[in-house]
């Protein structure tokens, strides 16, 4: 393995032309310069210098290694500068996987604060429901995943979890028509229901059974905008979290909060700490945006 310090000496000798000039440039003594060159020859097994009268010049092998050494030292300098910029939050990127209703509510403010505080950090977004987002983390294709879960769901210990508060569920009914009343879960035990993603559908079934009925699910879609339009058109009633209503609210629906029913939001990372500085910066901003500000309809 070539020693970069000795390469630096060889490059300085090639550039300056004499040991004395190289020693002056590097702030070394001439014996130190000679020692580094001798050690470099021993490490490489090549003759790199040749005595000429009272001076010294590089051999063909020495000149070749000096040229390559200049390239190597430049790359090391560039790597050091890039690492310094990354660790000081002046550059870099962080990849965020996020579910749809958070992408249009939590994320814009998060991106704005990141841009204000760390303009050199690029935040890349990929929209993904929680199961897919966790897979992206495991595969190294995302650095942070914004996910949600319900009361009986617990994260794997492989993930590090930052809690980001709760998100109240709402009973969504049409503004008018046969399904407009009542405004309670049990009151719609005979009504058709519109279910969401698999996680949301399971929570609907659990809540309905606790209220004493098995809901008749007529439609299922994880597009919350489509859910609102179907409800407004009278095709059923639904449950939606408040984030979805903040992202989009159809004028012909009524949202009745269910204060005791909610999902919890979390930011996940994968693997053991420490995190990259860019990741910790994003987590701090996500916490500021969400914690203490549970969004209600």
Image (cartoon, rainbow, N blue to C red):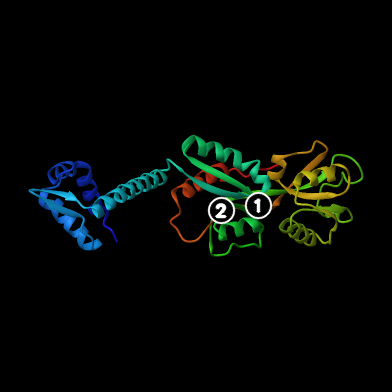
* CA gap, disc 1 and disc 2: 11 Å
Residue 175 image position (x, y, % from top left):
85, 39
Q: Which residue lies most toward the right here?
A: 178
Residue 115 image position (x, y, % from top left):
51, 36
Residue under the image location 57 percent in, 60 percent down: 139
Quick one: 40 or 215, which is closer to the camera? 40
The quarter of the picture where residue 213 lies is bottom right
In the rendered structure, the answer to whether residue 280 lies left or right of residue 70 reads: right
User: Mark 1 touching mark 2, by CB under 8 A?
Assistant: yes
Residue 86 image position (x, y, % from top left):
42, 45
Residue under the image location 82 percent in, 42 percent down: 229
Check disc 1 and report the residue beneath it. 128
In the rendered structure, the answer to whether residue 257 lies left or right of residue 154 reads: right
Residue 255, visible in the rendered structure: yes
In the rendered structure, the answer to whether residue 206 lies left or right of residue 295 reads: right
The quarter of the picture where residue 178 lies is top right
């Amino acid at each position: 393995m070539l020693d970069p310090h000795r390469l630096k000496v060889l490059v300085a000798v090639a550039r300056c032309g004499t040991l004395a000039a190289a020693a002056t440039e590097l702030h070394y003594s001439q014996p130190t310069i000679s020692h580094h060159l001798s050690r470099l020859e021993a490490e490489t097994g090549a003759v790199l210098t040749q005595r000429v009268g009272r001076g010294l010049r590089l051999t063909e092998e020495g000149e070749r290694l000096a040229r390559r050494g200049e390239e190597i030292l430049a790359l090391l300098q560039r790597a050091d500068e890039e690492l310094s910029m990354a660790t000081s939050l002046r550059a870099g990127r962080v990849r965020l996987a996020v579910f749809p209703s958070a992408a249009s509510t939590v994320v814009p403010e998060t991106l704005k604060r990141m841009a204000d505080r760390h303009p050199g950090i690029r935040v890349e977004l990929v929209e993904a429901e929680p199961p897919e987002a966790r897979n992206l983390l495991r595969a190294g294709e995302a650095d942070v995943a914004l996910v949600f879960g319900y009361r009986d769901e617990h994260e794997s210990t492989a993930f590090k979890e930052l809690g980001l508060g709760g998100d109240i569920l709402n009973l969504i009914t049409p503004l008018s028509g046969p399904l407009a009343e009542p405004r309670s879960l049990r009151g719609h035990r005979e009504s058709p229901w519109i279910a969401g993603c698999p996680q949301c559908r399971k929570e609907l079934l659990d809540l309905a059974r606790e209220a004493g009925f098995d809901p008749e699910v007529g439609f299922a879609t994880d597009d919350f905008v489509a859910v609102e339009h179907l409800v407004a058109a009278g095709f059923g009633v639904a449950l939606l979290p408040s984030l979805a209503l903040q992202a989009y609210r159809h004028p012909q629906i009524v949202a009745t909060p269910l204060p005791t029913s909610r999902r919890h939001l979390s930011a996940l990372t994968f693997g053991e700490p420490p995190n990259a500085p860019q990741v910790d910066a994003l987590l701090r901003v996500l916490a500021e945006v969400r914690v203490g500000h549970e969004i209600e309809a």
